[in-house]
Image (cartoon, rainbow, N blue to C red):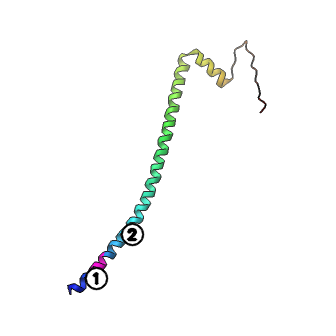
Amino acid sequence: MIRFLLPRLFGVAIIVIALAIVPYRAIDSDSQLMLDRMTADVEQANSRLAELAAENTALRKEIRALANDPRAIEKFARRDLGMIRPNEILMKVETGQ
């Protein structure tokens, strides 16, 4: 009797194992895709963070210069605000493009 049950039990065990592995592999591949996406998102966020940190450093440097250096204030006023001194004449040169 054991001779007849053993092959059937072995066959049932293989089917049970196969049925357990198939959903696991499906979930595992979805998990891998999600992990890859999340890893890409983290890398993108880290890159953006580095850009913002560099911008923040540059802005802090500009703030210190504007607070302490009159030439920096004049440069800012000329460059960003288009200001000129009272005795100067502003001449705009247009290129032929």
Residue 59 vs 26, above or below: the answer is above
For badge 1, the amino acid type reads: Arg
Marks 1 and 2 sit apart, C-alpha to C-alpha, by 21 Å
* Residue bearing the label numbered 2: 22
Q: Quadrant of the C terminus?
A: top right
On screen, 47 above or below 34?
above
Q: Looking at the picture, how far across and down is residue 53, in whole percent?
A: 49, 34
Crowd tier of the residue under label 1, counting other residues whose Cα lies within 10 Å: few below 14, some 14–19, many 20 or above? few
Residue 57 vs 68, above or below: the answer is: below
| Residue closest to the eye, 64 or 18 | 18
Secondary structure under tag 1 reads helix
Q: Tell me the residue at 45%/53% (across/down).
A: 36
Residue found farthest to the top: 87
In the rendered image, which quarter is residue 15 located in?
bottom left
**Disc 2 residue type?**
Val
In screen coordinates, is 55 left or right of 97?
Answer: left
Q: Label 2's element?
A: helix
Q: Residue 32: name its quadrant.
A: bottom left
What is the chief secondary structure element of the magenta stretch?
Answer: helix
70 with respect to 20 (left or right): right
Q: Position of residue 94 (x, y in %)?
A: 77, 27
**Circle number at residue 8:** 1
Mark 2 is surrounded, within 10 Å at the Cα level, by few (under 14), some (14 to 19) or many (20 or more) other residues, namely few
Q: Which residues are magenta?
A: 9-13
Q: Pick out the residue farthest to the bottom.
A: 1
